Amino acid sequence: MGSSSSSYAPKTIYLDVDGKVQKVISDSVFSSSHCRNTAIMMVDPEGALVSIDPTMPTNSPNVHDLNNLLVFCRAFRINELKTEVTNRLAMLEKRVELEGLKVVEIEKCKNDLKKLRDEMTSRGGGRVNCPCKYNFSDDGKKVTPRRDVPNYPKYTLSQETVEALKKPTFDVWHWEHNEMLSCLEYMYHDLGLVKEFNMNPITLKRWLLAIQENYRNNPFHNFRHCFCVSQMMYGMIHLCNLQEKMTLTDMGILMTAAVCHDLDHPGYNNTYQINARTELAVRYNDISPLENHHCAVAFQILSLPECNIFANVDPEAFKQIRQAIITLILATDMARHGEILDSFKQKVDNFDFTNEEHVTCLKMVLIKCCDISNEVRPTEVAEPWVDCLLEEYFMQSDREKSEGLPVAPFMDRDKVTKPTAQIGFIKFVLIPMFETVMKLFPQIEEIMVQPLRDSRDHYEELKQIDDAMTEVELYLSIYLSITAIYFTHPSQERSLYIPVKPAADTFTIMFC
């Protein structure tokens, strides 16, 4: 019996394959079984597609008939593609498996650390649990943002807000954390820093999130204080026209140092760290322990690829930027106030913006001004910060008393009042520093120096009232005591005059 499939006589076909003539002999030429794993197409000399089947016409390799050659075009090889895809899938599966193992190992390490910390806690250990000690292995402290930018609301700042941001009168109390983050983000864009350092805008958002989450909820040294200092720096850049006198790199250093200057502040100052011999004091040999720690946390955040706003900066340039930021943050230690201000005073009369040493000294003074600039702001904005600072001071002094450590009088709740806390600070620290800066930038007198003078007068008036009230209370107490004696011994002289030391006017308490 005959076969049910059609049969064809062997054929010879000549193909042009990559410029070479190839001879193909087949009884079915290119059947589907031959072609199923190779994607090809054939075209005639005019570019028209030729059907690939047993009925293809024969042709000749004769040089005179080259125009009759069919052209073999290989689109791609399915087998090769499948092999490549299979290999890549295998590589990806291996990577996923390895990453999964890493996650398991990390979780195991975390559990081991937690067990060890719990064991140490159960054994006591003196100040092991002191909240002012930073622990890099602390599970509760996450340098990486706990939320990513999709959950970071985008705010469109009004023109009114944009203009207010440039002024020291900006009211920092009306803004939520996300709004403050948006304001900081705007400052970086507005100053041209995103473009200058070729920052990825999403990386900038992640960095700001990480910054915000690494400020603790202290009464004073918190993220709102960070925003205050950064906003004042942004205002001084505009007010003093620093963009015309310094480089954009300088602007980036000033802003970034301001944003990072109190990262992970524990709420207890350097004096406590040193006297209590905390981990930070031991680590930094009692030399600006907090400021060194702020720098360390800042660059720990920047070391994360997803938070590195300087990722596209040349390594040598980044080295200089890093050193400059460290210099500014360390300058915020008030123990160095006299040294830094004296150095600036020696330069200010002949200041040279082309002199790198002069510019560095100015930047140190600028961040110091911004760090302690609350009294430059309107009274209703500035005064709540005094309450916050005193609350933090009192927390520290209470702790110092309980631990038998020395207590600074200006931090003792039994000795300090709001006026006494501010008058000396404004008169002997703030006004002299801002007036020195005013020699270089006279335009700050009206908007920054005069408010300081007004604030000094305000607290001096409050102190006079407090003193008068204290005297009245004192002599009222004496009056009541003597009254009690009089009625207890009625036979004594009934006319008594008690002179009172005058506070404003001379007056006498008298009873008969």
Image (tube, grey):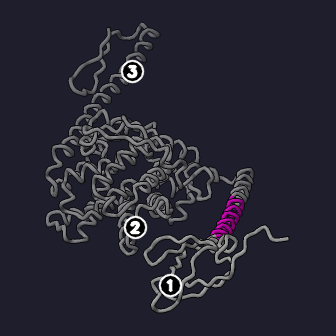
In-front residue for pair 438/488: 438
Name the residue that disc number 3 marks: 478
Q: Find the residue positioned furthest to the bottom.
A: 63
Q: Position of residue 307 (x, y in %)?
A: 47, 58
**Label 2: how many Cα within 10 Å (few below 14, some 14–19, many 20+):** few
Q: Which residue is mark 2?
A: 312
Which residue is at a point 21% across and 38% down the rendered structure image? Answer: 454
Q: Nearer the viewer, mark 2 or mark 1?
A: 1
Count all numbered tags in the image, as a single digit: 3
Q: Amino acid at mark 2?
A: Asn
Q: Secondary structure at mark 3?
A: helix
Instruction: Find the distance from the CA under tag 2 to the CA under tag 1.
Output: 45 Å
**Which of pointers 3 and 1 lies earlier in the amino acid sequence?**
1
Report how far apart the C-alphas of labels 2 and 3 lie in the structure: 74 Å
Residue range (magenta): 82-106
Which part of the image, by quadrant, shows the N terminus?
bottom right
Q: Which residue is mark 1?
A: 18
Picture residue at 26% right of the left edge, 18% below the top: 508
Relative vertical location of residue 15 with respect to residue 154 in this rendering, above or below: below
Residue 75 horizontal side relative to residue 431, left or right: right
